[in-house]
Image (cartoon, helix red, strand yellow):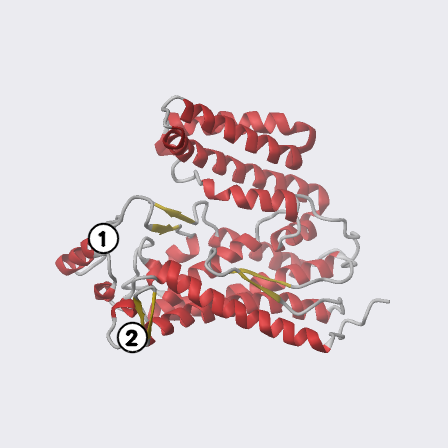
C-alpha cells in the first residue's frame, strides 16, 4: 500500500538534514579550495589555523561559507519548488536528498526528490517540472543583482596571490584587462562561459570582473553556477525539467525530435572539442606525432558509436558519420569552431544517454495545458536560452 502524500517516516528528517549539512560543508570547502583559492583570505594576517601550510583566516571562512550558502540556497529553493508543486497535486514524493561530492566539481552533485508514484496527467507533470527552475531562477536573479550592486573595485585583486600581471595592469589602468593575463602555467586558469542573461546584467553594473577572474568573487561565482545549473536542468531531454516541459507542451513525438536534436548538438560540440585537444594530448602520451592524431580520431569515433547507438537507434551510423564529418572542419577552419567546441560535454552525454535517457516515459495525454500554462512553459524555455553557455567552464 502506497503511503499518503503527507506521510514521511520520522527518521527521514534526520537523514535529509544531515545530507544538507554535509553538502553545505562539502560545497563551502570545495568552492574555497578549488575555485576561490588564493584570495585575500589566504594572505590575511592572524590565521586561525593552517591547512597544508596555508593560513586559514576568518576572511577565508567567510568567503567559503558565502559561496556554499549562496549555492545551496539556489539548490534548495529549486528542489522545494518541485516538492511543493508535487505535494500541492497530492503526488507522493520525498524531501530533497542533497548529494555531497567533496573536492569534486563544486562540492555537490545537486539534490533530487524521489517521486514515489506515476504522475497521472500533463498538467501535473508540467507544474512539477516547471516549478523548480522558476523558483531557483528567481532566487539566483535576486542574489546576482545584489552581488553586482555590491562589487568591490578592481583593486580587490591586489589581495589575490599569483596574479602579479593582472595586478600590475590594474595599477596602470585602473581596470581589468579584456583578455586573460596569466602568471600560471598553461591549463591552470579557469575561464567561465558568458551567458546572454549574465552579459545583459553586466551592462548595468560597474566593476564587473572578467570571466577569467570572476571565481575569486564567492557570491558572484555562486550565482553564475546557479544560472548554469538552471540551464542544465532545462535541457530539453528525457526526464530533466526541460524534458518535462517539452513533453507537456508538444507531446511525445516532438519531444523525441527535439531531444535528439539537442543531443546531436552536444555530441557535435564534444567531438569538435576532442578534435582540438585529443591529438596533442595523445601525441604526448604516446610520444609519437603520427599515432597521436590517428588515435584521437579512433577514440572519438569509438565514443560516438557507443553514444549514438543508444541515442539514435538504427540510424546511429548516419549520425556518427555526420558528426565526424562536421567536426573534422574544426581542424580546417578552427576559428569557426573554437567558440562551439567543448570536450567537457562528454560526461554529460553519457549521463543523458545512459542514465537520464533521451526519451520521456509515457504520461497519459489527458488534461491538456491551458493558455496560461503554455505561456509559462514558453517563458521557462526562454530562461534556458538566457542561462545556457555552450562552453561553460574550461581552462587555458
Mark 1 — residue?
177
Horizontal relation, residue 52 to residue 243: left or right: left
Q: Secondary structure at mark 2?
A: loop
Question: How many numbered circles does the render carry?
Answer: 2
Q: Which mark is residue 212?
A: none
Q: In the orientation shown, which residue stands out farthest toward the right?
A: 1
What's the residue at 41%, 66% (across, down)? Answer: 144
Kindly indicate the quadrant of the structure image that contains residue 70.
Answer: bottom left
42 up-or-down from 247: above or below: below
Mark 1 vs mark 2: which is more N-terminal? 2
79, 348: nearer the viewer: 348
Is residue 183 something that shows in the picture?
Answer: yes
379 up-or-down from 89: above or below: above
Residue 51 lies, in percent from the top left, at 35, 67
Q: Foreground mark, 1 or 2?
A: 2
Horizontal relation, residue 25 to residue 128: left or right: left
Mark 2 — residue?
47
Horizontal relation, residue 36 to residue 263: left or right: left
Kindly indicate the quadrant of the structure image that contains residue 160.
Answer: bottom left
Residue 63 lies, in percent from the top left, at 36, 70
Cα separation between marks 1 and 2 = 32 Å
Residue 111 lies, in percent from the top left, at 59, 63
**Mark 2 closeness class: few <14, some 14–19, many ≥20 residues within 10 Å:** some
Residue 39 lies, in percent from the top left, at 29, 65
326 up-or-down from 183: above or below: above
Amino acid at each position: 500500500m502506497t503511503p499518503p502524500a503527507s506521510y514521511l517516516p520520522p527518521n527521514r528528517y534526520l537523514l535529509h538534514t544531515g545530507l544538507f549539512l554535509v553538502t553545505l560543508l562539502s560545497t563551502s570547502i570545495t568552492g574555497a579550495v578549488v575555485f576561490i583559492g588564493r584570495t585575500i583570505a589566504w594572505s590575511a594576517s592572524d590565521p586561525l589555523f593552517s591547512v597544508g601550510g596555508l593560513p586559514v583566516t576568518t576572511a577565508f571562512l567567510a568567503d567559503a561559507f558565502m559561496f556554499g550558502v549562496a549555492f545551496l540556497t539556489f539548490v534548495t529553493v529549486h528542489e522545494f519548488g518541485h516538492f511543493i508543486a508535487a505535494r500541492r497535486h497530492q503526488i507522493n514524493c520525498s524531501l530533497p536528498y542533497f548529494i555531497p561530492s567533496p573536492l569534486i566539481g563544486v562540492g555537490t552533485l545537486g539534490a533530487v526528490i524521489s517521486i514515489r508514484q506515476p504522475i497521472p496527467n500533463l498538467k501535473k507533470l508540467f507544474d512539477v517540472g516547471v516549478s523548480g527552475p522558476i523558483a531557483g531562477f528567481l532566487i539566483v536573479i535576486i542574489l546576482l543583482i545584489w552581488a553586482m550592486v555590491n562589487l568591490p573595485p578592481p583593486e580587490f585583486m591586489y589581495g589575490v596571490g599569483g596574479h602579479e600581471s593582472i595586478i600590475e595592469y590594474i595599477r596602470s589602468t585602473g581596470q581589468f584587462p579584456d583578455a586573460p593575463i596569466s602568471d600560471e602555467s598553461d591549463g591552470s586558469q579557469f575561464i567561465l562561459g558568458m551567458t546572454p542573461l549574465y552579459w545583459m546584467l553586466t551592462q548595468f553594473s560597474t566593476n564587473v570582473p572578467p570571466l577569467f577572474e570572476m571565481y575569486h568573487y564567492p557570491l558572484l561565482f555562486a550565482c553564475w553556477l546557479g544560472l548554469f545549473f538552471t540551464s542544465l536542468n532545462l535541457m530539453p531531454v528525457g526526464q530533466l525539467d526541460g524534458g518535462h516541459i517539452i513533453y507537456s507542451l508538444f507531446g511525445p513525438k516532438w519531444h523525441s525530435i527535439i531531444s535528439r536534436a539537442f543531443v546531436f548538438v552536444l555530441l557535435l560540440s564534444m567531438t569538435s572539442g576532442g578534435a582540438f585537444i585529443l591529438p596533442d594530448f595523445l601525441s604526448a602520451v604516446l610520444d609519437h606525432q603520427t599515432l597521436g592524431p590517428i588515435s584521437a580520431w579512433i577514440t572519438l569515433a569509438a565514443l560516438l558509436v557507443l553514444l549514438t547507438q543508444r541515442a539514435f537507434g538504427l540510424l546511429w551510423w548516419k549520425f556518427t558519420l555526420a558528426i565526424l564529418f562536421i567536426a573534422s572542419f574544426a581542424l580546417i577552419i578552427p576559428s569557426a569552431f573554437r567558440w562551439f567546441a567543448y570536450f567537457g560535454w562528454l560526461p554529460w552525454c553519457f549521463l543523458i544517454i545512459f542514465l537520464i535517457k533521451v526519451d520521456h516515459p509515457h504520461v497519459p495525454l489527458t488534461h491538456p495545458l491551458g493558455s496560461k500554462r503554455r505561456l509559462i512553459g514558453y517563458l521557462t524555455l526562454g530562461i534556458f536560452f538566457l542561462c545556457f553557455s555552450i562552453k561553460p567552464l574550461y581552462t587555458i
